[in-house]
Image (cartoon, helix red, strand yellow):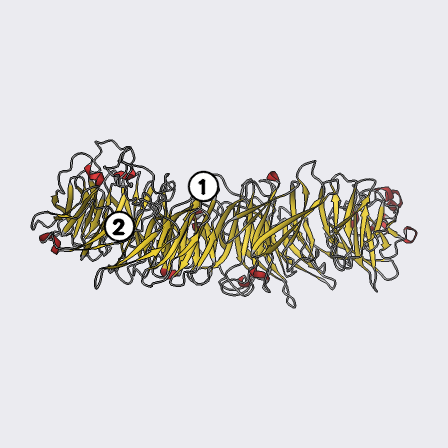
Amino acid sequence: MKRFAYLLPFFAGLAACGDRSAAWEDAPATTSLTVGLADRVVVIDDALHRALAIAPQADGSARFTTTTVGHTVTAAVATADRARLLVLAAGDQPRKTNKDEPPSLAILTATGSQRFPLESPHSGVALDPEGRYAALYALPAAAGSTPNFVENPNEIVIVDAAPGEAPRLVPHTLRSFGGRPQRLTFTAPLGLPGGTRRLLVVETDRDISLVDLASIHDPTPRPDITIRLTSGSSATTAKPAGIAIDDGDPTVDDDARIGVRLDNDASVVLITLSRGTNGELQPTLNLAAVGGTPTDIAFVRAGAGSADPTKAGLRLAALVPGTRRAVLVDPATSITTDVSLPDAYSKLALVTAEAGGGAGGDVALLYGGYTSASGGVAFLSLGKASGEPYRSVEVLSLGSAIGSVLAVPAPNANLKILSQTNGAGFFVLDLAARTASPLQTRSAASLLTAADGSRLWAYQARTGNLSRIGLDDLHPVSVPLERPIDAAFDVARVGGGRTLIALDKSGLFAATLVDADRPDATQARTYPAIALEGIQ
Amino acid sequence: MHAPKSALGLVLLATSSIYACGASDSATTFGAEAPSGAADAGTGPSGNGGASAVDAGPPPEKEIESSFQAPVATGNFVWVANPASGRVAYIDAKTLEVKVAFAGNGPTQIAALPSTGAGSGDATVVLNALSHDATLLRAKEGVLERKTFAVGDDANKWSVSKDGRWAIAWSDASLVPGAAKSRGFQDLTVIDVTGALPPQILSVGYRPTAVGFDGAGKLAYAVTEDGVALLELSPGGGAAPRLVRNVPLGSDGPGAATARDVSVTPDLRFAFVRRTGDAKVGVVPLDGVGAAVDVTLDGPVTDLDLAEDGSKAVAVVRETGKVFVLPVPAIATKPLEFASLPITGETVGSVSLAPAGDRALLYTTATPVERLSVLSLAPALSFRALRLYAPVAAVFPAPAAANAVVLHTTGSDGLGAFSLVPVADTLPAKIVQMNAAPFAVSVRDDLAIVAERNDTTRVYGAWIARFPSFRTEHFPLASAPLAVGVVPSAGRAFVSQMHPEGRITFFDLATGAARTLTGFELASRVVTGGTP
């Protein structure tokens, strides 16, 4: 479809007046790839192979800039600090002429961009929460969906963007026993035999691989460690379904652990990153049955009783909604302690610092109703008295199952936003006070919190219904917009302050800017057809 | 014979364990038993033929025999067999790295081979029940050597020589309950692990009950119902081991062997025979020199133990409360010349000689007596009594006999107890209440480990007691314990446990830290380095 079919009659007469950009000949790309960075929103325009950035200015207007990216964008993700955008492109497939672009990775920052050609297209990006690394890999997908005739799913690319250095891409092929990567996780620095360093933990569909990030640039990197989760005595493969990581005592270099829960298996695997005969990292394994398939796990501590919190009882907590239990597994002995729960919670999040815990033991927020009758959340507090771990469960009954929990940045990190699964509203949970304030919505709302932690936005997708809720007073302010909202982002504004940018992804895209601190629909600025921006 | 001879504990189980390993002759014996005083007249190896429903005299002394096997520890590794997979896992006790080795079909009994010198590595032999062979596994400088030998069909136990050169696979009929009388279990397979001589299957008397070696590693013996069979291991000239002679132990009639206790001196010169209810101790020369003699004591001999150096035999007559010391070899030619000492004021029926040989522990398990006597054998016979606070079920002296562990009978509440007894010092014993019945024990000069187990309440744990301080630490366990042991070179004790994937908990003896490994074969599939 021609981009400007409706304008053809007008331009027809001017056709002979001069050349125009080929971009006009291309149909606008319908893309859902919109990413919020710290101070801008980026829309991926795959048809024109560019990233269109919308940056709010001091006067409330928007400044548009474009950056070239690769062809056939498969992923666009922002780093944890929202300072950089990684755009992964598969290139032109099949590539028959030298004009056809190869796969590439573009890294966009506020000051510029860099593009790196890739040997193969990748569809997944795993990000380092500390912002230094990223890993490109093949998302688990049905066979035959790859653009290449043959693809090795165990070929990954590690992107190392160390501060002060130019990003480096390191291709890496994982050792495989038939598995394909499912999830990649970058660890924090861990005390390990041979020195403190970080690992990339790759969960395939049958094993765990550990990639040593400290040596990826070495001429002879440390070999991967592969932990096979199936004993080989049967054809059934044990599939990882999630991991938890604990560094242990920071002064000890052989007690870091990885907990693994398995898909459709009632055991958890505890991997201790011990020292081997040669002094190098040699994982040892421990299994513990938890009485049912766990849906979530986390390492928790059952209280200190001493100045050194690491001497407290370390446990791997496993939520088993099928039995309405949390099972605490002692990683040293495999001894399990069952904690009966009043409901079948399926998710847990550690909220110790926010809930005012710490010296007395970890506090976990349990949520995620497993059954339709489940409702509310619960606090699981772990402590230690007279050397024996104890735990208490405090239920906050909300009368509705909670589907997701949204974190709020500081200074309101003690708040969590709980979305009801029935779409009737949400709660603002105060972890310290253990209060939950309900906010009702007419229909299911999409929620986002501001990076400065001071407010919450709620909007109804594909409508102009928008509200701003101050997290200090929980006062909702309605900010109805003209254009329907498909996505919204709260970003910093040039000169100070913050702006909400709401996007309408239909047609040629539209962006509406609203002052986030003093939202006023009458003062909102709407920019229609932003897909035309930058086209001469 | 009760004295534990090594640091490795064995476990009595009613059902078979997945990980079954053979114990050497020197294994510590232990077992859970019925409360003392239970009438079991005429049953079991200690059955007292004199007891009947009318004459409710004291029951026989209960001997705690091992009827199951444990993982074995060599210098650096703990070895565990998995009959289901045909593999043997060996765990480095220092690093807890697990490797597996393929054995044969259905590996069950494992025995550790003593080190033959520096650089000889860690070696074990394992019986493969289904392929009717045995596999020698030797881990040496990171490389595993493997050899397979054919063995007799019914072999279910190992005996290993002290020099580590010889291993005999034999059949213990007590491990095959309900075996037909026509099954004699008479084949012994003598294996030269060096390979210098080929394995040899030899036939001995009916149903051997014990197999051992002399200290020099030249001769072996098998105690059978037909007498003691003597085997020459290296006849010379490259000849294979051979059966030299069979020495009858007296004609006792059918089934008499089950009421007979035979102890063989370390040099294989004599066999001491005690028969239940008999006041005579038979001294039978095995070397063909001289005739057998009977040493008549003053009442039915309830127990007899032989010193590890073979210099004496100590017998107890509960009826008269006397202990008798028979000098070896003099008693064979002068059966009337022996020393005795009445243990006045005490009830004793059992004796446990410390391996060091200069002390013995006297007690009774037939009646609920809460006392123990320490018998000094040199320079003169003397004794002192120790007060305990629960009836005795079993006694385990440490090798140097400075201390001992006494297991007490389990109460009706299912709780057991053990006492730490100072043998060398005149100090009170310390009793420790357990959370379940004792299940396995291992005693060394510096520490003891006692495992507890209650399958009904699912309470499982291990106690580590230190000598001489008697400090105890308790460690709960996630699964039922199977066996305990110590790997001194790694500074770790271990408790193996029941788990489909295999489970063992190691305790760092310096720090008290516990580490559990579960999933031996899974752990062996961790790939580090460039090659799987």
* Residue drawn 81% across the image and 47% down it: A458
- Give coordinates of residue B348: x percent, y percent: 28, 50
Instruction: Please name whichever residue, A284 or B110, is drawn nearer the observer in this view of the structure.
Output: B110
Instruction: Please name whichever residue, B219 or A440, is drawn nearer the observer in this view of the structure.
Output: B219
* Residue drawn 38% across the image and 60% down it: B428
Query: Which residue, as the protein is rendered here, is positioned at the far left?
Result: B290
- Give coordinates of residue A253: x percent, y percent: 51, 63
Q: What's the residue type where badge 2 is placed?
A: Asp
Query: Which residue, as the protein is rendered here, is positioned at the far right?
Result: A522
Mark 1 — residue? B455
**Which badge, 2 or 1, is on the more N-terminal residue?**
2
Chain under disc 1:
B
Please determine whether, in this image, residue A314 is positioned above or below residue B187: below
Chain under disc 2:
B
How many numbered marks does the figure carry? 2
Q: Seen in the image, is A404 located left or right of residue B328?
A: right
Please determine whether, in this image, residue B508 is positioned above or below residue B25: below
Q: Seen in the image, is A232 located left or right of residue B307?
A: right
Q: Would you say residue A155 is visible in this rendering?
A: no
Mark 2 — residue? B25
Instruction: Please name whichever residue, B70 or B304, is drawn nearer the observer in this view of the structure.
Output: B304
Instruction: Please name whichever residue, B420 or B180, is drawn nearer the observer in this view of the structure.
Output: B420
Question: Which element type, helix, strand or loop, lies under badge 1?
Answer: loop
Which mark is nearer the camera, 2 or 1? 1
Q: Residues within 10 Å of mark 1 (few under 14, many from 20)?
A: few
Q: What's the residue type where badge 1 is placed?
A: Asp
- Give coordinates of residue B468: x percent, y percent: 38, 63
Please determine whether, in this image, residue A470 is positioned above or below residue B183: below
Question: Which element type, helix, strand or loop, lies under badge 2?
Answer: loop
Residue at mark 2 shares a chain with residue at mark 1 = yes
